[in-house]
Image (tube, grey):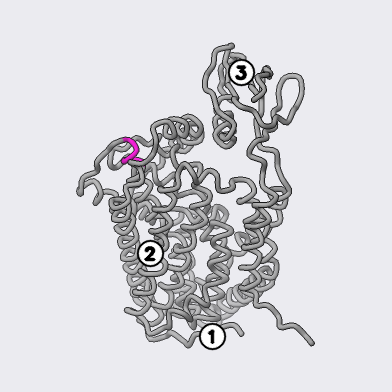
Amino acid sequence: MRLPRVKLHNQIIIGLLLGVFFGAIFSVNPYKISLKYKSGEEVVSYWSEIIFLKDSLPQITFNSNEQTQIIKYSKGFLTLPDKSQKNILIKYPDGTSKLYEDVTVIDKVKSIGVLLRPIGDIFIRLLNMIAIPLVLASLIVGAASLSDLKHVAKIGGKTIAFYFMTAIIAISAGLLISNILQPGYFMAVETKEKLLVAFQEEARSKIEQNVSINIIDFLVNIVPKNPFYAIANGEFLPIVFFSIMIGVFLTQIPQNKSQPVINFFEGISDALILMVNKIMYIAPYAVFTLISATVAEFGFNILQSLLLYSTTVIIGLIFITFIEYPALLKIFTNISIKDFFSTQKKVIAVAFSTSSSAATLPVTMEICEKNLGVPNKIASFVLPLGTTINMDGTALYQAVAAMFIAQVYGFDLSVTQQITIVITAVLAAIGTAPVPGIGLIMLIVILRSVGVPEEGIALIIGVDRLLDMCRTVPNVIADSLACVVIAKSEGELGPIILDN
């Protein structure tokens, strides 16, 4: 008897679950580190204390269960530009100790769970390879079918208004939950000091990027001086602007000249969508390697010291994903909530494993057009725009993180300051690039806006990668939601087609 074939989205979910188990089994040993020093290389295991020394003077001491903090601190300590001698003294439970002179590198001892990651990285690169040309081709074809700038402005206005609304709700939810749970007030002083020291160098590198929000510059920069530069650097909003202009003005020239160009880009778009379909065959294996590498490398130990903070963020993300979005779906469309989320399984799995809205964009476009009944001319406009300006999950995380850091430092933020967080987080979400980890940089802007010490990001860097995976999910679901809402408002939403 022939066994029934497992659906692709179920294969991806199975790959994700197996990746969690595989990563947990073949995890990086938290009690081993690899040292490179003046006279060789050595793996050190099961120490009681590691003391960083500079010119024989103790700098800081870590104990046996602080591998992550040791490695993070070492990246800054060992690369200090001064010419002082940087040594490591390691003490063991039996009372013995060993001094390592002129240490250059301290790192984890990689396991098979981490070594498999390149397979997943290739998958992400393939999706990123497709994203920009797919946006360019689809948007030119879509804009050409909209026929005039008035129609484009109408859909654009609806899209931006919808994204602003969902962002404000998400940020407000994050602030409300943070005020109720108050996660920052429960962090021990000792834990705070350890995290600040361990992650200070990484925090400093983020702060030195000196990101700021200037709404006038943001609007000006939407118009590209060189569209090829924007394409090469993955700047979505300038690409969207350029594509719309090309598409609209193709309709203003004789059809015998415009139609071959439109057919060319339509062929490119169709070929790229087919490429997405083929690439998705390796998705279960890629997701398996990405998740297993993340779990193997970071594990769940780092969550212990930041458990309440992480829980607060996840509660907020669950709220906007499974309460806010279904409510908006029922208000603006007649689509079944169950059917909508059924079509999103593949999108959710790819978003969670890649932590990137841009990498997920080709999959989201395929699902919206193939399964949700959204016409190409709307999907090709709404989704690229959403990938850039719609970051509900990131915006909520930034609100919770700002409140958490303020609470740890003892700042009691007023209502006015929390309103400032809402405004700044909305603007930050619009200007946030759709790549992993960018939310942490934009958080610095929010902290500056309310006078909270920006070096406080060192408190949360340890769990940022895991929470980045979680917050990307509502980011991409909101894009699909916006697609069906705009299509419904235009009277062009087709029937949902569920995969058999």
Total number of numbered discs in the rendering: 3
Residue at 42% across / 34% down in the picture?
A: 192
Which residue carries the number 3 mark?
Answer: 86
Chain-order first, disc 3 or disc 1? 3
Chain-order first, disc 2 or disc 1? 2
Chain-order first, disc 2 or disc 3? 3
Asked whether the residues under the numbered discs 3 and 1 touch, taking CB atoms below 8 Å apart as contact, a structural biologist would say no
Specify the label residue 225 is tagged with.
none
Which residue carries the number 2 mark?
Answer: 319
Q: Is residue 482 above or below residue 410?
A: below
Where is residue 449? Give x, y as percent: 29, 42
Image quadrant where one finds the C terminus? bottom right
Please tell me whether residue 208 belongs to the stretch shown in magenta: no
> Looking at numbered disc 2 in the image, what kind of residue is underneath it?
Phe
Residue at 53% across / 49% down in the picture?
A: 465
Q: CA distance from mark 3 to mark 1?
A: 63 Å
Q: CA distance from mark 2 to mark 1?
A: 27 Å
Which residue carries the number 1 mark?
Answer: 497
Q: Which residues are magenta?
A: 405-409
